[in-house]
Amino acid sequence: MHVVCPHCAGINRVPDERLQHDPQCGTCHRPLFTGAPVALDDAGFERFVGRSELPVLVDFWAPWCGPCRTMAPQFEQAAAMLKGRAVLVKVNSDDNPRTSMRWHIRSIPTLLLLRGGQEQRRQSGVMPAQELVRWVGA
């Protein structure tokens, strides 16, 4: 399984049976899974989601958005619950317009579930953490 390091963007091969055992990056030696959402920008988005073989759940948000602020703690809880099974990332749509435009984000919060860099599902609006976990299906 290819896993992209959230710290240095290094690509790591991790055996499936080791995903749940807190693997570390072979380059920077930091944890590959922190149990927290990873903040991505336009520059790092494609490399991160395109090379990760784990499901990637993306939350497009903005700091001024009330529903986005409501969603944030739910998304953090889901990231902890899905540690080692999926990667949850956040993209500030105001600061990263290229990524938002590429994925045709028209409202926020919008969630995308990507596998191998390909969109599998899309949902707009707030979702509770347990529903996020079920929605990812990891």
Image (spheres, grey):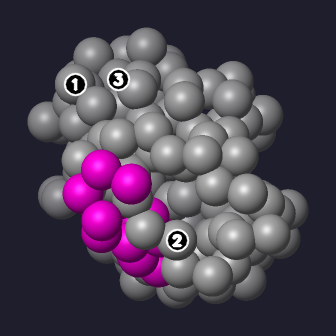
Circles 2 and 1: CB atoms closer than 8 Å: no
Quote the CA–CA distance across marks 2 and 1.
25 Å
Q: Is residue 96 above or below residue 98?
A: below
Q: Amino acid at mark 2?
A: Pro
Comparing marks 3 and 1, which lies closer to the viewer? 1
Q: Which label's residue is closer to the chain start, 3 or 2?
A: 2
Q: Which label's residue is closer to the chain start, 2 or 1?
A: 2
Residue sitting nearer the eye, 24 or 72: 24
Q: Which residue is mark 1?
A: 43
Span of residues in magenta: 26-39
Q: Amino acid at mark 3?
A: Thr
Q: Secondary structure at mark 1?
A: helix
Residue 89: image location, x then y, percent: 43, 54
Residue sitting nearer the eye, 20 or 116: 20
Residue pictured at 30% horizontal, 50% vertical: 27
- In reply to whether residue 38 is colored magenta, the answer given is yes
Circles 3 and 1: CB atoms closer than 8 Å: no
Q: Amino acid at mark 1?
A: Ala
Q: Which residue is mark 3?
A: 99
